[in-house]
Amino acid sequence: MRPRGHASHSPVLQSLVGAGVALLGLALAAGAFTIPSNAGYAGVGPNFLPWVVALALLTCGVRLFFKARRGGFRNMEEHTGEHPFWGGFAWLSAGLLLNAALITTIGFILSCTLCFVLAARGLRLAQDPLAKGWAPTVRDAGVGVLIAAPVFWAFTKFLGISLPGLTQTGWL
């Protein structure tokens, strides 16, 4: 049985979460509306995926809102008293922000590898705050390159989509 006075179980706060997700979906739909819909490969244009994500967020937000209004999230776990690990959040945020800032300077492969390394570091520290050593970071860099390089080549060489590279050869 859940306590009625617990703030995280408030139907009003839960309704706000649903409304926020729905508003995020509407904002993404507004952004997708500005993307040209010229059909590309297989008749799908560049605005297709943003529309899919916008509609999914809007659907989830509306469902969350009505679920909250009909009694709240019934199977929600009780708060354990643990606080979020802000250090991990900082590492993840740094990875995403540096990727966005450096992608045109150091290219897609290196910026995505850096993003992967920093995100993996943040997740590793969230799991074990005392994790140390260079070995996991070097391994993460290798895995990041092994993920980013084939994605870069698939987009640039096979699909003909231009991504920022480090060199003019089109391979890095």
Image: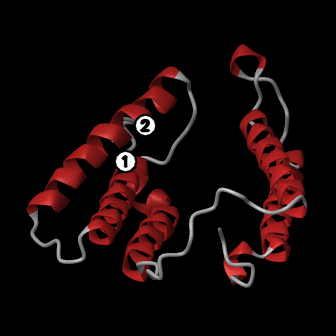
Look at the numbered disc 1 and give the secondary structure of its residue.
helix
Please state if 125 lies on the left or on the right of 99 as rendered.
left
Q: Earlier in the sequence, mark 2 or mark 1?
A: 1
The one of 125 and 133 positioned closer to us in this rendering:
125
Assess whether mark 1 and mark 2 are in contact (beta carbons under 8 angstroms): yes
Q: Residues within 10 Å of mark 1 (few under 14, many from 20)?
A: many
Q: Is residue 72 above or below residue 37?
A: below
Please state if 164 lies on the left or on the right of 7 as rendered.
left
* Residue type, mark 2 in image: Phe
At a point 54% along the width and 75% down the height, the residue shown is 79
* Residue type, mark 1 in image: Ile
Q: How many numbered discs?
A: 2
Between the residue at mark 2 and the residue at mark 1, the CA separation in whole angstroms equals 7 Å
Q: How far across and how far down the image is residue 28, in percent?
A: 80, 54
Quadrant placement of the C terminus: top left
- Say the numbered circle drawn on residue 109: 1
The one of 88 and 66 positioned closer to us in this rendering:
66
- Say the numbered circle drawn on residue 92: none
Q: Is residue 127 above or below residue 104?
A: below
Q: How far across and how far down the image is residue 146, in percent?
A: 27, 38
Q: Quadrant of residue 106?
A: bottom left
The one of 48 and 54 positioned closer to us in this rendering:
54
Q: Quadrant of residue 11?
A: bottom right
At a point 16% along the width and 51% down the height, the residue shown is 139
Q: Is residue 145 above or below residue 12?
A: above
Please state if 56 lies on the left or on the right of 88 as rendered.
right
Question: How is colour applied across the structure in the image?
Answer: secondary structure
Look at the numbered disc 2 and give the secondary structure of its residue.
helix
- In the picture of the structure, the residue carrying the numbered disc 2 is 152
The one of 69 and 167 positioned closer to us in this rendering:
69
Q: How far across and how far down the image is residue 87, in percent?
A: 37, 80
